[in-house]
Image (cartoon, rainbow, N blue to C red):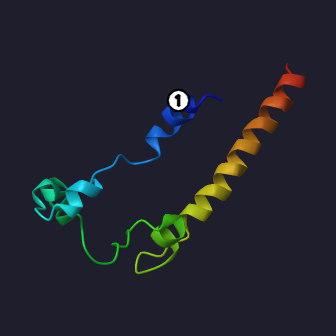
Amino acid sequence: MQPSLIRRQLGGLVPPKVATPSLLSSGSGAGLGPLVNFYSKLPKGAAQTTASGGIKARFFNGKNASAAPLLFTIFGIFGIGYTIDYQKHHKNHAH
């Protein structure tokens, strides 16, 4: 592979240079304003926990615990199986 092709493919993975050594060593810090502004807007502290947590957390845990999804799944599989068997029976035994 050509070096330019590799550089182009990795361009999306490797972040661009934001602070150059000359900018950092000059001591002015004026060029870092956008970078400082960007990082100051990021949230601080631990990440927030999401309320979703999946089907188990939504239906089986907590004050709204219910077995409804399990029952719907059982009856849904039964209904699909019954429909398939019904179609097979009437297809082979048509009057």
Q: Residue furthest top?
A: 95
Image point (76%, 44%), residue name: 81
Q: Residue furthest right?
A: 92
Q: In this rendered view, identify the residue nearer to me: 31 or 36.
A: 31
Residue 56 percent location from the top left of the image: 54, 70
Image point (45%, 39%), residue name: 11
Residue 71 percent location from the top left of the image: 61, 62
Residue 7 percent location from the top left of the image: 51, 36
Q: In this rendered view, identify the residue nearer to me: 81 or 23.
A: 23
Q: Is residue 93 visible?
A: no
Relative to residue 75, is residue 56 drawn left or right? left
Q: How crowded is mark 1: few (under 14 residues within 10 Å), some or many (20 or more)?
A: few
Q: In this view, does 22 lie above or below 6?
A: below
Relative to residue 33, is residue 71 drawn left or right? right
Q: Residue furthest bottom?
A: 63
Secondary structure, mark 1, is: helix
Residue 93 percent location from the top left of the image: 89, 25
Q: In this rendered view, identify the residue nearer to me: 81 or 28.
A: 28
Question: What residue sits right under mark 1 in the picture?
Answer: 4
Q: Is residue 39 above or below residue 78?
A: below
Image point (24%, 68%), residue name: 43
Relative to residue 83, is residue 23 drawn left or right? left
Q: Is residue 22 visible?
A: yes
Q: What residue type is labelled 1?
A: Ser
Image point (22%, 61%), residue name: 24
Q: In this view, does 47 lie above or below 18?
A: below
Q: How many marks?
A: 1
Which quadrant is the N terminus positioned in?
A: top right
